[in-house]
Structures are given as structure tokens and as C-alpha cells.
Amino acid sequence: MNKKIVTGTIIILVLIFITYLTFSTRITVKGPRITIDSWGHHIEGIVKNELTYSYVLKDQGVTMGIFSGDGFVTAVAQERADALRAKYGDFFRCDSAGKEEAIQSAQGIIFLAQNSTTKNAISEALSGIKKNPTQVSFNGKRIIILKNTYFGLNVEDTTGTEILYVKDFKILGPFKP
């Protein structure tokens, strides 16, 4: 009887450990190289120099089998959003004359937080964009993907979505037309 309990406990612990390894995010940075293992994804890349970014976050993205990091968003660079607002007013509205330019200016961004404070701030911003487009600024490093697999299968992403390794994430408030 005790042997069955011990064997059952060991099997459960092994399954928990395998689940943890498969479905947790592990990031390793060595010099300019980065490795990301998350939910069956394995990504290897090069981390570029840190820059300061300002964006208006419009929508939270939805993915199926695509790495989505700590947040996947559709965003417009702040400077471009300000120019569109000056020209069209509320250019995010579907009936706006500026909607085509807004669509062309939008880009997909995947945020990968460098620390828990940044991860929490990204989560807060994602909650905010459900109500209003949200202005944010942060320091981040663009990741150039060298290898991308999902459960061992090669992934070819041709969407132009950028992965940014982010810190010092600040919510500046709602974007008002």
C-alpha cells in the first residue's frame, strides 16, 4: 500500500515539474543573445541596444500558437498618434477620415518584461486599453529573432510584429482626441 502511495506521489511530482517547465516563461540573456522558453515556444535571438519608446496602445492582441510574451498589443507611435489627432481628431473611430492612416500606422508589439514591476505595469496598461487607448513610455530592447519553434516545429512569423524586452514601463494616461 505504501509503495503505491509513494509511486503515485512521485508520478504527480514529475507531472507538475514537466508542466512547470513547459508552461512557465524562462528568459536567459548572455551578452547580446537571448533565449526565451515559454508555453512550448523556444525563441533564440539578439537583443539590440536599449531605446526609449512612447506609444499609444489601442488594442490587446489575441494569439493562437504565437508567442505573446507578457502582452501583445496593437500600437501607434506617440509622435504619429499626435500628428493623426491634430489632423483628424478622434482617428481611432471607425467613421473617422483618418482611420486608414491609423491602420497603416499601427503595429503589433509583444512586450517581454525584464522584471515583475514592469510585468505588473504592462498588465495594468492592458486592462486600461479595454476602456480607452492608453499612452505609455518605456525603455526597451528590440529582439531580432534567429530561431523560433513551437513544440519543436519551426515558426515563420511574417507579420512584422516586434518583440521588445521592456523595463521602466510607465502609463501616461488615456489618449484623448
Image: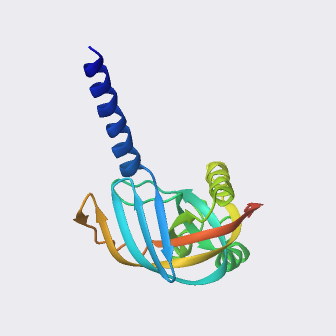
Please provide percent x and percent y for residue 82. 71, 75
Give whichever of 107, 49 is nearer the camera. 49
- Place residue 68 in its image quadrant: bottom left
Q: Residue furthest left?
A: 153
Number of numbered discs on residues: 0
The correct choice, above or below, for 18 with respect to 135 in the image is above
Residue 4: give x, y in percent of width and height.
25, 20
On-image quarter of the C terminus:
bottom right
Q: How is the image coloured?
A: rainbow
Along the line of sight, the residue nearer the viewer: 93 or 116:
116
At x 54%, y 76%, the residue is: 105
Residue 116 visible in the current orientation: yes
Q: Residue 128 at what x, y percent from top left?
A: 67, 51
In the shown orientation, is residue 93 left or right of residue 176? left
Q: Which of 175 and 64 is in front in this view?
A: 64
* x and y percentages locating residue 164 in the rendered image: 54, 72
The one of 68 and 152 positioned closer to us in this rendering: 152
Position of the N terminus, as image quadrant, is top left
Could one spot residue 98 in this view of the protein?
no
Picture layout, residue 146 above or below residue 1: below
Give the quadrant of residue 125.
bottom right
Q: Which residue lies furthest to the bottom in this view?
A: 49
Task: In the displayed orientation, state which residue is furthest to the top.
Answer: 1
At horizontal 40% and vertical 55% (from top left) the residue drawn is: 63
Q: Residue at x 34, y 45 (%)?
A: 18
